[in-house]
């Protein structure tokens, strides 16, 4: 079984991005900039943002975090986004989710100029991705895509099963696999007999949020299994895939932690650089 090492792949990608930033600096005398807006004191959000800022600096991006208290009003956030939209030194804008209840997520996402939407959540980017046009692509599915391609460069004709249909993961993952000429089945909480669907997959991407949902007898031999889930349990962090069982049958599998997670941030940096390149 191939243990897909997301940490290693993310480090390789970051090295490539570092070189690209140096090259862009030499050519245009400018560097791409990422601005993250963090609202409130949620511990996981603070950790994610700290990691994003650290990684951005490591590859040589200009990185800025703007923090607001939980009580900040929506208009203050929207006005800050409008200001950043006009700022030429900012290539990418990310508003860390989740937002406090009194702030409308849709309004915030739509306020970001699609050209600076490094998360790929703006409806224009979602539409562009599904139409096959150039767009920012949500970072986690993009990371999954790179990991799958490392194991199997030619995905044409493969049967892919995506578990979960969120805007963040399942839906963009489906688009990326379709683009690679996979035959994709997207499954969700109302899917009947998920095990039977999974057994058809040459590729399974699990983005559900249920600890160890995918069992060893759900997976056929030679399947590539990508585990997006991050679930806190009594035995520590586990994914949506039962690692012990599935590792005995799958062709390749991502661990949790150390699989998809590290690729997510590396892809955010890549998206920032892509936004910069499209702006010059
Ligand atoms: P989400 O928005 O809650 O979506 C979960 C999806 O799973 C929904 O489409 C839901 O179906 C489906 N689902 C729920 N129960 C199911 C079942 N029994 N069988 C089949 N499908 C079922 O979650 P998300 O934001 O996509 O995140 C999914 C997981 O990925 C979470 O564990 C999250 O922490 C993790 N995550 C990891 C990263 C990373 O960097 N590694 C990034 C983001 C998220 P319905 O649509 O019918 O409700």
Image (cartoon, rainbow, N blue to C red):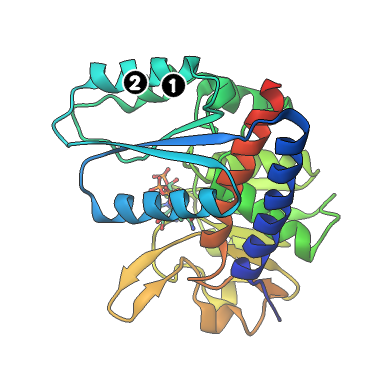
Q: Position of residue 44 (x, y in %)?
A: 30, 55
Residue 80 bears which disc, if any?
Answer: 2
Please say whether residue 134 is visible from this viewpoint: yes
Give the quadrant of the C terminus.
top right
Residue furthest to the left: 71
Question: 10 Å neighbourhood of mark 1: few (<14), some, or many (≥20)?
Answer: some
Separation (CA) of disc 1 from disc 2 = 6 Å
Where residue 124 appears, x then y in whole percent?
57, 20
**Could you tell me residue 258's position as x and y percent?**
53, 70
The quadrant in which residue 224 appears is bottom right
Vertical order, 262 against 24 (above or below): below
> Is residue 197 among the parts visible in the rendering?
no
Give me the residue at 70% from left, 62% from top: 12
Disc 2, SS: helix
Question: Marks 2 and 1: in contact by CB < 8 Å?
Answer: yes
Q: Which residue is mark 1?
A: 84
The number of discs equals 2
């Amino acid at each position: 079984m191939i243990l897909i090492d997301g940490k290693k792949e993310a480090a390789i990608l970051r090295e490539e991005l570092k070189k690209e930033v140096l090259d862009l600096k030499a050519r245009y005398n400018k560097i791409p900039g990422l601005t993250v807006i963090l609202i409130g004191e949620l511990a996981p959000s603070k950790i994610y943002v700290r990691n994003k800022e650290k990684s951005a600096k490591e590859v040589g991006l200009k990185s800025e975090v703007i923090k607001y208290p939980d009580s900040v009003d929506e208009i203050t956030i929207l006005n800050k986004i409008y200001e950043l939209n006009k700022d030429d030194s900012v290539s990418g804008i990310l508003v860390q989710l989740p937002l406090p209840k009194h702030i409308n997520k849709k309004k915030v996402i739509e306020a970001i100029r699609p050209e600076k939407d490094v998360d790929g959540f703006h409806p224009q980017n979602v539409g562009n991705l599904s139409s096959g046009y150039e767009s920012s692509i949500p970072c986690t599915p993009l990371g999954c895509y790179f990991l799958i391609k490392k194991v199997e460069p030619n995905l044409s004709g493969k049967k892919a099963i995506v578990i979960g249909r969120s805007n963040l993961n399942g839906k963009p993952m489906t688009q990326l696999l379709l683009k690679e000429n996979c035959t994709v089945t997207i499954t969700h909480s109302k899917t009947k007999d998920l095990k039977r669907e999974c057994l058809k997959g040459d590729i399974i991407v699990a983005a559900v949020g249920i600890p160890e949902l995918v069992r060893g007898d759900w997976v056929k031999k030679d399947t590539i299994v990508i585990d997006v889930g991050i679930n806190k349990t009594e035995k520590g962090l586990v994914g949506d895939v039962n690692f012990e069982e599935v590792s005995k049958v799958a062709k390749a599998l991502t661990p949790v932690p150390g699989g998809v997670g590290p690729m997510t941030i590396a892809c955010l940096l890549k998206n920032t650089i892509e936004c910069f390149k499209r702006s010059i």
